[in-house]
Image: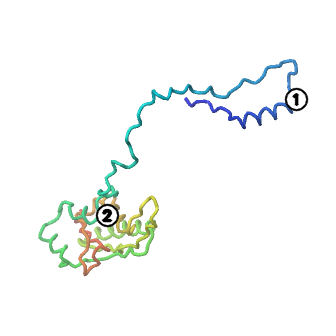
Amino acid sequence: MRKPRHLSSEERALWDRVAERATPLHPTRQEPAPDLAPAPKPKKPVGSRDPAPDFHIGQKASIARSHDIMRPLVDRLATAPVNMDSKSFGKMKRGKLKPEARIDLHGMTTAEAHPELVAFILGSQSIGRRLVLVITGKGKDRDQGGPIPTRHGILRHQVPQWLALPPLSQAILQITPAHLKHGGHGAYYVYLRRSR
């Protein structure tokens, strides 16, 4: 339960001036308004004060650690388990496998890119494609230095998350950043499961 708010001395003086000018509804009743000012707290004697703790704001903060909760995207994809044939995976990472189709999401908003990606991936799986290339672009640095940091390249970070969620997760076997000749960190290889 919240403590009641008490009137300040200025508010009390203003109320008294308004009350003097008002015409009472019951002139026979003469009850003064109760004084709602809070009672002053008893002060401790000067000699009985507790010593202040030796504390400074931020003294235990670790400056060395990163403030980003998630690991960098490249690290997360590199440590993801290999779900496909390891020989084919090695060829794919070295750029030796040629993608059968590609979609360029570069320049789209997230609202435009998500339905395009879903249609492309599910359509590719239904016609039997195995390796497709999703181009996101590396993104522009839009961080204005404010209190909330913004990520470098929104589609670059959003696309792997979309691929890991239904309905796309059931169609995908492996995701990895593309080789430099296919776009490097601005694109992803998506290896699809065989359609059943």
The label number, if any, that marks residue 23 in the structure image: 1
Give the colour scheme of this rendering: rainbow
65 or 57: nearer the viewer: 57
Judge by depth and name the residue closer to the eye, 110 or 186: 186
Contact (Cβ within 8 Å) of mark 1 with mark 2? no
Give the residue type at disc 1: Thr
Number of other residues with Cα within 10 Å of mark 2, as a class: few under 14, some 14 to 19, many 20 or more: some
Instruction: Residue 75: name its quadrant.
Output: bottom left
C-alpha separation, residue under disc 1 versus residue under disc 2? 73 Å
- Helix or strand or loop: what does disc 1 sit on? loop
Name the one closer to the observer, 58 or 130: 58
Label 2, secondary structure: give it: helix
Q: Is residue 64 left or right of residue 25?
A: left
Image quadrant holding the N terminus, namely top right
**In this rendering, is residue 192 above or below 5?**
below
Instruction: Give the camera-side residue of 20 and 97.
Output: 20
Q: Determine the residue positioned at 57% across, 27% down.
A: 41
Residue lying furthest front? 47
Crowding near pointer 1: few (<14 within 10 Å), some, many (20+)?
A: few
Residue at the limit of the structure toward the bottom, as seen here: 181
Residue that extends furthest to the left in the rendered view of this protein: 87
Q: Residue at x 62, y 25 (%)?
A: 39
Q: Which residue is disc 2 drawn over? A: 160
Viewer-side label of 1, 2? 1
Tag on residue 63? none
Q: Residue 37, percent across and down? A: 67, 28
x, y percentage for residue 112?
45, 69
Say which amino acid is labelled 2. Answer: Pro
Tell me the quarter of the picture where residue 73 sits.
bottom left
